[in-house]
Amino acid sequence: MRPEALTPTRSHLSGAVGIFGGTFDPIHYGHLRTAYEILRALDLTELRFLPAGQPPHRAGTFAPPELRLAMVRAAVAGLEGFVVDDREIRKQTPSYTVETLAELRTELGPRPLCLVVGMDAFLGLPKWYHWERLLELAHLVVAHRPGWVAPTAGPLGELLALWGTKTPMDLHAAPAGRILVQAVTQLEISSTDMRALLAAGGDPRFLMPDAVREVLVGSGLYAHAKPR
């Protein structure tokens, strides 16, 4: 793996863009709190929510792509620094992160890109499509919650030893190539829990934005919770 040159240059000291992908099936305050803390801790110009269209790592999603996109848009409407990117929803083929990052790199030029992943996703990185190219295209920001331990051996341990940093400003000094493990607040909320709650006829009030709740309550969307 050959990340881009890591010598700090002042031309990269502003304009860092965060990329926060996921199925968001549905989106909830756990997603939003993580995104907010990453946006501020890394001093990002913007953080893009990028809902997956056809995620290749799972059988399907529970809500259709267009509705998941609508929920994400409703969740972040009017929130400074948050942007919705629908490119993967618009694709007619499976969405591979490395291909999305390559598109963004072409569009945004040398601006730093910061791909935000959870520690669980980071531990499974070697199973991703062309995962070894990720650091050529973006920095990796691993959102770390209590109970997860960063690897110290194997290919991921070697990556952290070579390219890991504890300094957020290092991500502004080059377009790609560094790994930052960033602690975030742990909220015991998951999309799985939200689907189960809604399937049981429960109300997700205070677990997600009211604009998203209004889409879901009474819709029957997750009544059977069978992936499409």
Image (cartoon, grey):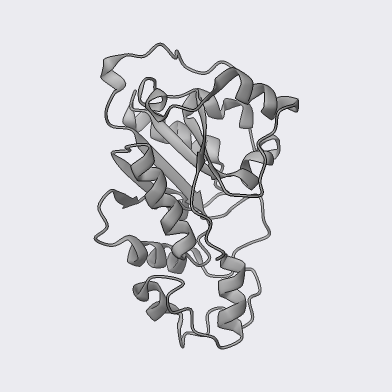
Q: Position of residue 51 (x, y in %)?
A: 47, 55
Q: Point out residue 17 in the picture as x, y percentages from the top left corner.
A: 35, 37
- Image quadrant for the C terminus? bottom right
Return the residue found at the far right.
154
Q: Count the marks: how many?
A: 0
Name the residue at 26% across, 18% down. Answer: 11
Residue under the image location 58 percent in, 74 percent down: 195
Residue 98: x and y in percent read 54, 35
Could you tell me if residue 49 is visible in this image? Answer: no
170 versus 57 height, above or below? above
Is residue 71 something that shows in the picture?
Answer: yes
Up the image or down, 28 lies above or below 198; here it is above
State which quadrant residue 214 falls in: bottom left
Q: Is 132 on the left-hand or right-hand side of 139? A: right
Closest to the observer, 6 or 180: 180
In the rendered image of this protein, does residue 223 appear above or below residue 178?
Answer: below
The N terminus, quarter of image: top right
Report the residue at 39% width, 20% height from top. 174
42 displayed left or right of 131: left
**Closer to us: 166 or 124:** 166
Whole-percent x, y for residue 68 in the image: 46, 65
User: In the figure, residue 121 lies in which quadrant?
Assistant: top right
Q: Residue at x 43, y 42 (%)?
A: 19
Q: Is residue 227 left or right of residue 175?
A: right
- Horizontal side of 62 relative to 137 (left or right) equals right
The one of 32 and 144 positioned closer to us in this rendering: 144
